[in-house]
Amino acid sequence: MSFLTQLPEALYPQTKFANFRPGAAFDLDTARALIWLSQLAYETDTAKIKRICGGLEITLIGDPIHKSVASALPIASTYVMVFDVSGSTVVSFAGTDPVVLANWVSDFDIRSTDGGAAEGFLAALQVVEFDVLARLPAGHPVVVTGHSLGGALAVLLAQRLDAVRPDVQAVYTFGMPRPGREPFVAPYNASELGKRTFRLVHGNDIVPTVAPSKFDFQHVGRYAKAPENGKFTVAEDVAGSNEPGFEEGVANELHDLLRDPMGQIGAYARRLRDAAAALLGRPVPHTRSDTAGIVIDMLPPRLRDHMPDRYIAACTH
């Protein structure tokens, strides 16, 4: 994983997830805990991971799992960790690393399998599935989570687990792409698991708009939306929303650019000014001053809205 998807250790919470309550109702405290665990799945320094787990009073079950597999396209690469959190077992998948080609291969290999799931996602799951199952304690409720590509893998694993051991309490995904077509999506959304799956989307994040719905790809779970730089509050009552749309997002972006080009230039100039201030040791309050944070602030808006730190902020009171 690259530095863009990892956080300085000092930015992680220093107290345990006291209000972690996964269940059939959308819970913001649970979402907050799970976006932190989704972020933690991006880390590659095992000693750092264990120190963070100690501060959160959670346990990493086994070592982090990282595997690659040859596929129809060059490589599928998957990171996943399993945690014990307040008596629940949490499986957390890392997502798309912007600078790792293998992850993008998985994201956009959208040929569907016989079950309707995207082939790239299924290949990325299958390479770690056995190792994950070996870490799940018998009799413990399971929660599955992930950011970006990790959200799609979380949904696929939850569906496969639910068929053999119906103890999946909840699924929370952050910035997830559409995971499959009708044969996968329809039964998932109609099931009890569909009611316990919460799909969080921040701002104008581009990843939830792919694969475009015109290719018959659809979303699963109950949709929760936070405005750009805003907060999550509730999730829809039923599963099945296919928002946000790819074409609509592109159209809105072009509209904003054409309507107010000087405003867009001015916004980018302000980000350059804030980046320069951070590099000089005078960061704007409530912004990151580490190198990755500065680089992220310079990304195009639809990529910036996708980054895990934006989801962390949107889940925080």
Image (tube, rainbow, N blue to C red):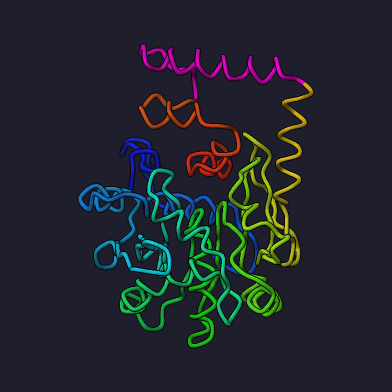
**Residue 141: x and y, percent?**
46, 75
What residue do we see at 43% from left, 12% from top?
A: 277
Is 30 displayed left or right of 136 in the figure? right
Q: Quadrant of the C terminus?
A: top right
Is 259 located above or below residue 2 in the figure? above
Is 170 displayed left or right of 11 in the figure? right
What residue do we see at 71% from left, 66% from top?
A: 216
- Residue at the bottom extreme, as displayed: 164
Asked whether 286 or 264 is in front, the reply is 264
Is 275 magenta? The answer is: yes
Asked whether 215 or 298 is in front, the reply is 215
What residue do we see at 60% from left, 38% from top?
A: 302
**Residue 310: x and y, percent?**
53, 39
Is 63 displayed left or right of 309 in the figure? left
Is 200 magenta? The answer is: no
The magenta segment is 260-286
What residue do we see at 65% from left, 37% from top?
A: 230
The quadrant in which residue 238 appears is bottom right
Is 248 displayed left or right of 124 in the figure? right
**Residue 135: x and y, percent?**
31, 75
**Residue 271: x and y, percent?**
53, 19
Is 66 located above or below residue 315 in the figure? below
Specify the principal SS of the magenta part. helix
Asked whether 67 or 30 is in front, the reply is 67
